[in-house]
Image (tube, coloured by chain):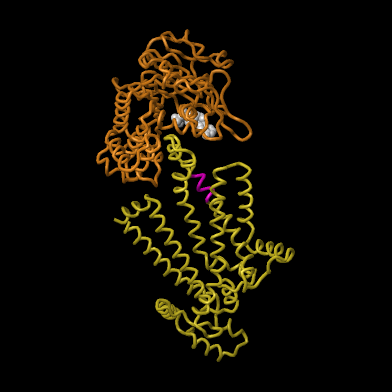
Amino acid sequence: MFAYILNRVARAVLTLIIIVSLAFVILRMSGDPAIMILGPEAPPQAVEAFRKAWGLDQPIWVQYAKYFGAVIQGDLGNSMRDGRAALEVVWERVPLTLAITVPALLLNILIGLPAGVLAALFRNTAYDRLIMMVSVIGFTVPSFVMGLTLSLLLAVWLRLLPSGGSGTVAHAVLPVVTMGIIGAAVIARFTRSAMLEVLGQPYIRTASAKGVPWSQVITRHALANAAIPTMTIIGFMVGSLVAGAVVVESVFSWPGVGRLLVTAVANRDLAVVQVILLLIGFTMVAANLAVDLLYGWVDPRMRTKTATAGA
Amino acid sequence: MSVVSEPLLTIKNLTVEFDQGAHFVRALHGVDFVIERGQSIGIVGESGCGKSITWLAALGLLGSKARTGGSVRLDGQEILNCSDRALAHLRGSRIAMIFQDPASSLNPVHRIGRQIGEALRLHRGLTGAAAKAEATRLLDRVGMSNPAQRLNEYPHELSGGMNQRVMIAMALAGEPDLLIADEPTTALDATIQAQILELLNNLRRENDMGLVLISHDLGVVADMAERVAVMYCGRVVEESQVDRLFDAPRHPYTRGLMAALPDIDGPKRRLKAIPGMVPPPRNLPTGCTFAPRCDHATEACASRVPGLRPAGAPRHRAACFHLEDLPGGSRQPASPAQQPVQETV
Ligand SMILES: Nc1ncnc2c1ncn2[C@@H]1O[C@H](COP(=O)(O)OP(=O)(O)OP(=O)(O)O)[C@@H](O)[C@H]1O
Ligand SMILES: [Mg+2]
C-alpha cells in the first residue's frame, strides 16, 4: 500500500513539473508579449524598455530557469495590466467560480449517479430510454448553446431569473443549472455503462446463485464494483472545478476565474494567464491523485498490483 | 421435505427462449431430468448445446431476457418461474451452483471470508465469530492451507484452483441437497482438475448430496457420474447409466464425442473431432439437428425431430432414427476416410 501511494504521489509531482513547463512554453510560443501589450505601432524604445522590465530580453532558457525558480518560491509575477501580484488577481476570483461550480458538481452527482444506476437496472425500459435521451442532449449540446437556451427560456421569456451578472443567488441559478444538467448527463452515462458492465459479470450471477436477494446483489455486490470506473469521471469533474466554468461564466457574465482567463488572454496578460493555467493544472493533478488513492482504497487489486510491481 | 417418495428434482419439458428484439429464439427444446437424492448425473455436449442454460433456467438465473417454460419440481414443489424472493431462499440452501471460471466468479472487492460469511448468514443465520469459525472449517474441509488466514484474502491473491475451492466452500455453506457444478475444472490445469473432482466426489458421498456435473469432457464425467445425459442443440440426445453409455453408445453424436476422447491405455493416437460446428439456436437445421454432421443421416432425418426412445438396455434412451441399423457394440471409431483427422495435443 505504501509503495502504491509513493508511486502515485511521484507521478503527481512529475505531472506538475510538466504542467509548469508547458505553461511557460505555450505562452512564449504564442507571440511577443511586448508587441501584443503595447500594440504594433509602439515606439521601439518603449518595446525595449518593456522587455527589459519583464526580463523578456534574456535568452529563453534563462527566462525558463528564472520562471521555474520563482514558481517554486510561489512568486508568479505581476499582472502586466495593473501591476498587482498575478496570484492575488486570480485568487480573488476563485471563490466566485467555486460558488457556481461546487453546487453544479453536487447537482451532477446527486442527479447523475442515481439516474445512471436506475437506467442500468431498468435497462431497455421506457425509463432507461428517457434518461438516455436527456443524457444525449446534455452530452452533445455545447454548453454555450445550453446556457443561451436556458437563458432565453427562463430569463428572457419567463423573466424568472436574471440573464447575467452576479451579486444575488438568483444570478447563480442559470450557470449552476446549465453546468448541472451537462455534468449530470455525463455522470449518468458513465454510471449506467459501468453498472451494466458489472451486472454482466460472473460474480453477480454467483451472488444470485448463492441466494442473495436481488436488492442486496445490487447494494452489496454491484455498486462497489461499479463505483470504481465511476470514480474516474467524478474525479475528472472535481479536477475541472476551476476550468470547467470558462464558457458558462462568459455566457452569463459571471466574474469568476473562467472569465478572467478570457480577458487575460485577450489582453495578453501573460502572468495572469500563467497563474490560471497553473491553478487549473494543480486542481486536476490534485483531483487525480485523490482518485488514485481512492482507487487503492476501494479496489484491492490495485494495491497489490503496484506494490508487487514496485517491489 | 415430507414427501419422501418424490425425487429430489424433476425437470419436465423445460424450454428456454431468448428475447432477440424482434422475436424469441428457442435455445432449449424441452428437456427432462430426474435427480434422486444423493445421485450424481453428468451432462456432456459441445459448447453451446444448452448445458448451462438448463440449470440456470431451473434456478431462475437467466434474467429478464429469457422466457422459460415447462416444469421444475423440487421435492414435488413447482419452482419454475417462482418469484425471485422465493427462489432466493432455495438458491444456495437447497440447490447450490459453481461455475467454470472461479477467478471471475468471486467478487473482486470482497474478502473471501466475507463472501463465505454472506452465505452462512443467509442460510444458517451465522454471524460474527460463529460465522468466522464455520467459514474456517469449510475452507479447511475443501483442502485449503491456512484457512483462517485465507479469510482475509481477496480472490486475486489466490490461484484458480484455490478460488474454485472457495467457490465450493461457499456452495457447501448452505448445506445444499444438490450441487450443480458447471464445468468446474475447465479453466484449471490437469493436476488441479483431478484434485477438485476428487474433492467434489468425496463431499458428495459425505453429505449425501446430489451432483450435476456439467462438462464437455466425457472422460471427466465417466469417473464421477452414475448417469450421463448427452446434449446437442438444446435437446438430450442420449441418456444412460454411465457404464452402459461408454460400453455401448448408440447415438452417432455420442460416438463422435467418444472418438474424440484420448485413449488412456493405448498408444497416443490422432484424435478425431466431429466435423462441422454446433449450429446456433437461431439457425437450427430442420429435423434432427445433428443430421448435417452425421455420417448416417438419411433424408428422413431432415424431415422430423427424433424423440428419445429405448436403446437396448433399461434406462438407456437415444434420439436417433437409425438406432437399429447402426452397428451395435462397443466404441467404434468412425472410418478415417469419411472424417477429417485433426491433430490434438
Ligand atoms: N443470455 C443469452 N441470450 C441469448 N442466447 C443465449 C444466452 N445464454 C445462452 N445463450 C445461447 O444458448 C445456447 C446454449 O448456451 P449454454 O450456455 O447453455 O451452452 P453450454 O452447453 O453451456 O456451452 P459451454 O460449454 O460453452 O458452456 C448457446 O447457443 C448460447 O449462445
Ligand atoms: Mg456452459
Q: In which quarter of the image is residue B230?
A: top left
Look at the image and give the residue range highlighted in magenta.
A191-197
Q: Colour of chain A?
A: yellow
Q: In the rendered view, tell whether residue B286 sits above or below residue B120.
A: above
Of all residues, the one furthest to the left in this rendering is: B146
B333 lies left or right of A99: left
Q: Is B288 inside the magenta-drawn segment? A: no
Of all residues, the one furthest to the bottom in this rendering is: A45
Residue at horizontal 52 percent and vertical 35 percent from the top: B63
- The residue lying toward the viewer, choosing from A2 and A39, is A2
Can residue A9 be seen here? The reply is: yes
- The residue lying toward the viewer, choosing from A65 and B336, is A65
Residue B65: image x %, image y %?
A: 56, 34
Quadrant position of the N terminus of chain B in the picture: top left
Q: Which chain is orange?
A: B
Residue A216: image x %, image y %?
A: 46, 42
